[in-house]
Image: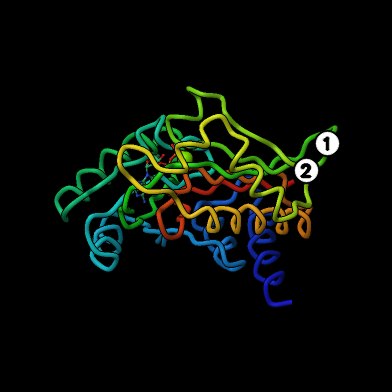
Amino acid sequence: MMIDVTVNEIIDLAAVSGRQLLFADEAGALLKSIGIPVSPCRVALDEEETVQAAAAIGYPVVLKVRSPEVVHKSEVGGVCLALTGEYSVRSAYREMMRKARMVDRQAQVTVQPMAVPGVEVLIGMTTDAQFGQVVAFGLGGIFVEVLDDITFRQVPLQEKDALDMLLSIKGSTILKGYRGSGPVDTNALTEIILNISKLAEHHPRIREIDLNPVFAYPVGALVVDARIVIF
Ligand code: ADP
Ligand code: MG
């Protein structure tokens, strides 16, 4: 099957490189190959490539550090949002690399378009010693730590399980619209949840998936940060 070839190839590449944590661009390519909507993401090897990538993507852009040593990018100054031109890209690149190269001399960056803001949710999967593979859903971004409002279901999920997850979090009303914004596209979210369940079911080599945040929109949804860990 076409789908599995891509997924396995990406997993193999990380495995032979001795990495359990896929790069964000690899995770993005994997998710895209199974139909999950992900923000485009280009790898740049140096400052000039970063500027070229930003121009090709179109401003405003986001720079993120790309290193196997960095799991939580914003904690180490590894995320620069809403860069509006070449000058700000260059200075963000230099500052980000100055910090990153202290922990990884080979650190690189990825360049993404700045996404339209949406309701931030998280969709994940972990492999639990007792329950096996479980899919997680909750509010993302700042809400994750503050509210501890995450719900879990065992793989494989049915459509009603996915829908039930959206309804069963405490912050469910946020999905129905807040601060004057309309409801988010629950179909788009359930589709991602079911897709993640299928991916985990067919690829037990994947140990953990963390899509955080996924921007939920009135129409559609978009993954802007993806972490995948393999066994
Ligand atoms: P971390 O490794 O720290 O989780 P993220 O890639 O999730 O890094 O970025 C941190 C935050 O920046 C996200 O929670 C989101 O609010 C914002 N963000 C990240 N990427 C984008 C993007 N492409 N467009 C708009 N906002 C973004
Ligand atoms: Mg994140």
Q: Is residue 96 left or right of residue 102?
A: left
Closer to the camera in the image, 20 or 207: 207
Name the residue: 46% across, 56% down. 221
In percent of width and height, residue 147 lies at: 51, 24
Name the residue: 73% across, 41% down. 153
Q: Is mark 2 within 8 Å of ligand 2?
A: no
| Image quarter of residue 49 | bottom left
Name the residue: 72% across, 45% down. 207
Q: Are marks 2 and 1 in contact (CB under 8 Å)?
A: yes
Helix, strand or loop for disc 1: loop
> Could you tell which of marks 2 and 1 lies nearer the N-terminus?
1
Neighbours of disc 2 within 10 Å: few (<14), some (14-19), many (20+) = some
Numbered badge on residue 131: 1
Numbered badge on residue 53: none
In percent of width and height, residue 109 lies at: 38, 50
In percent of width and height, residue 37 lies at: 50, 62
In percent of width and height, residue 124 lies at: 62, 43
Name the residue: 59% across, 56% down. 192
Closer to the camera in the image, 181 or 145: 181
Q: Residue furthest top?
A: 146
Is residue 165 placed above or below 60 in the rendered structure?
A: above
Closer to the camera in the image, 135 or 217: 217
| Image quarter of residue 94 | top left
Q: Is residue 60 left or right of residue 193?
A: left
- CA distance separating discs 2 and 1: 7 Å
Residue that mark 2 sits on: 154
Is residue 166 placed above or below 28 in the rendered structure?
A: above
